[in-house]
Amino acid sequence: MKHQQSRHRAERSYQLQIRRNLKRNFSAHLAHGLLGQTGFRLLTAPTFLPAYVMLLSNGSDIAVGIALAMQSLGMAITPLLGANLIEHRARVLPMGFLIGAGMRAMVLCIALAGLLLSPHSALLAIYLFLALLGLFQGMQGVIFNVLMSKVIPIDKRGWLTGLRNFLAGITAAGVAYLGGHYLIGVNPEPLGYSMTFLLAFALTSVGLAMLLFVREPEPPTLAANVSLKQRLAQIPALLQQDTAFTHYFLARSLATMGRMAMPFYILYAGQTLGLTGTVLGTLTVAFTLAGTFSNLVWGWIADRRGFRLAFLISIGLWVASTLLLLFSQSLAFNILVFMGIGAATQGFQSTAINLTLEFGHRDDVPLRIAIANSSSEVAGTIGPLLGGILAAWLGYEAVFICSVAFLLLGGVLVSAYVPEPRWASSKT
């Protein structure tokens, strides 16, 4: 009885610390996301990097697919390592700074490759740095989401995610337009892309520094400090005990295969519009601003009806936008299509991450994030490679149809077999 009372007091104290520091931690996460996402969107938007790889590879669709697959391959390998590094630690922020610094170093290397190397050598170097970036991202995806789950209450996460992505999207859109118009220009060269990615490095580095202001509480319970091999052996039992989570991460992986189309949206549009800096900047702005404003909607839906509903709506919008792209000819129509894709993919990304946090016990959150992220990025590795092969052999239309099929499969599985976890289970 005394032990139980002691645990209750420790839990109350922990929750009190979260509420006491909520404004400070909310602001720090907001600033980190604003600057960090602004920079990383310049690299990860489905415009600049695919066009850059296409330029360096003299027009190879398969090269574009390989580039995106290399990043996803890295992200598939390390989530379980990231979980094992932090799940037994009372504070995870120091490890977050180390991994975050590694991510930003890879962005710097990608930028310098275009400045210092020949096009062929730069392409090979970018493959390497994207793979290494993915390795760091795989761990970061666990560490920073665990940090958010510790300092931001569940009923505030939708608002934080929506507002953070909203503000980051506005600044990213402005930076993308300036980068496309002034740094890349009418006749794209490696120098312009490198300067754009240098700007991304600077913004993300300042964003990481904002986490110095976070006050991280120590939880009353922690997972046991076991080896990675022992933790991996526990995965089958965890999946058997929570079938809803098992169905969810499988569905998320299927839907993530839909990402195979991402690098080819801009290449398909470029067949009729051309891939000038102005076109790249304009469509990046459309993609980014749509994701920006939609985040407020996704956050509102998630806080009131749950992340599951927002997840399903985002898949439906993604499917509709991809199909509409097949009929796009003018710049205006393409802008509308990229707005739909931007809103849908942003909703999918933010809801998929947050939905993962709502299953099971708090002590297992790092492992659940790692399982879901690893399986998704395995799909994210296969998808671009398959997309590149389909694009080279059958054309971009085949890529889009295959992408839609995977998105629909994932959505149907969630709709049929995954109840809203917020209402289906209670958290401790």
Image: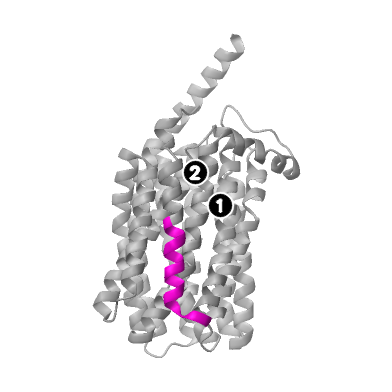
| Relative image position of residue 34 (x, y in whole percent) | 40, 57
Dot placed on the residue nearer the N-terminal end, 1 or 2? 2
Q: Is residue 97 above or below residue 258?
A: above
Q: Residue at x 29, y 45 (%)?
A: 300
* The magenta segment: 393-408
Identify the main secondary structure in magenta. Answer: helix
Q: Residue at x 50, y 73 (%)?
A: 198
For mark 1, what is the residue?
Answer: 373
Task: Tell me, yes or no, whether the highlighted magenta stretch contains residue 400.
Answer: yes
Q: Residue at x 59, y 59 (%)?
A: 378
Q: Which mark is residue 258?
A: none
Residue 276 seen in render: no
Q: Residues within 10 Å of mark 1 (few under 14, many from 20)?
A: many
Q: On the rendered structure, is 28 left or right of 118?
A: left
Mark 1: amino acid: Asn
For mark 2, what is the residue?
Answer: 356
Residue 220 seen in render: yes
Q: Quadrant of residue 114?
A: bottom right
Q: Nearer the viewer, residue 233 or 217?
A: 233
Q: Nearer the viewer, residue 61 or 72?
A: 61
Q: Residues within 10 Å of mark 2 (few under 14, many from 20)?
A: many
Q: Are marks 1 and 2 in contact (CB under 8 Å)?
A: yes
Tag 2, which secondary structure?
Answer: helix
| Relative image position of residue 342 (x, y in whole percent) | 35, 64
